Image (tube, helix red, strand yellow):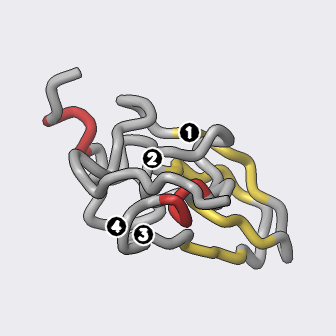
């Protein structure tokens, strides 16, 4: 059985035009979605594996202290996986 691949067009997809504000735990690994197709935003659910050519991958981050971080959900940030307010320049 072959699976139909998602064309690599108009990606990454904007999941939301705002950051996901998350209180992270020390020692816990977070896997950020870079393609915008994950159903578990801002986290990766491996949807990128279905994109033709597999041009995307998750970005894994580990924190050494509890803190509040802003994970990008527009997927256009210049500082992945963190929000740099690029979403404010996009047209929803």
Q: CA distance from mark 4 to mark 1?
A: 14 Å
Q: CA distance from mark 2 to mark 3?
A: 10 Å
* Residue designated by label 3: 56
Compared to residue 91, the image places residue 55 above or below, namely below
Q: Judge depth for marks 1 and 3 and give the one in front.
A: 3
Quarter location, residue 85:
top left
* Residue designated by label 4: 79
Task: Locate residue 84, reporting x and y percent.
Answer: 31, 53
Name the residue rendered at 58%, 46% in the picture.
38
Q: Earlier in the sequence, mark 4 or mark 3?
A: 3
Label 2, residues with CA under 10 Å away: few <14, some 14-19, many ≥20: many
Checking the image for residue 36, the label placed there is 2
Q: CA distance from mark 2 to mark 1?
A: 13 Å
Q: CA distance from mark 1 to mark 3?
A: 20 Å
Checking the image for residue 20, the label placed there is 1
Task: Locate residue 21, reporting x and y percent.
Answer: 60, 40
| Residue at disc 2, secondary structure | loop
């Amino acid at each position: 059985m072959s699976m139909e691949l998602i064309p690599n067009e108009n990606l990454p997809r904007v999941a939301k035009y705002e950051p996901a504000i998350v209180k992270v735990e020390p020692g816990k690994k977070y896997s950020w979605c870079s393609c915008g197709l994950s159903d578990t935003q801002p986290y990766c659910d491996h949807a990128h594996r279905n994109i033709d050519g597999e041009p995307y991958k998750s970005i894994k981050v580990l924190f050494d202290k509890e803190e509040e971080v802003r994970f990008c959900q527009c997927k256009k940030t210049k500082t992945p996986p963190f929000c740099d307010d690029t979403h404010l320049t996009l047209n929803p």
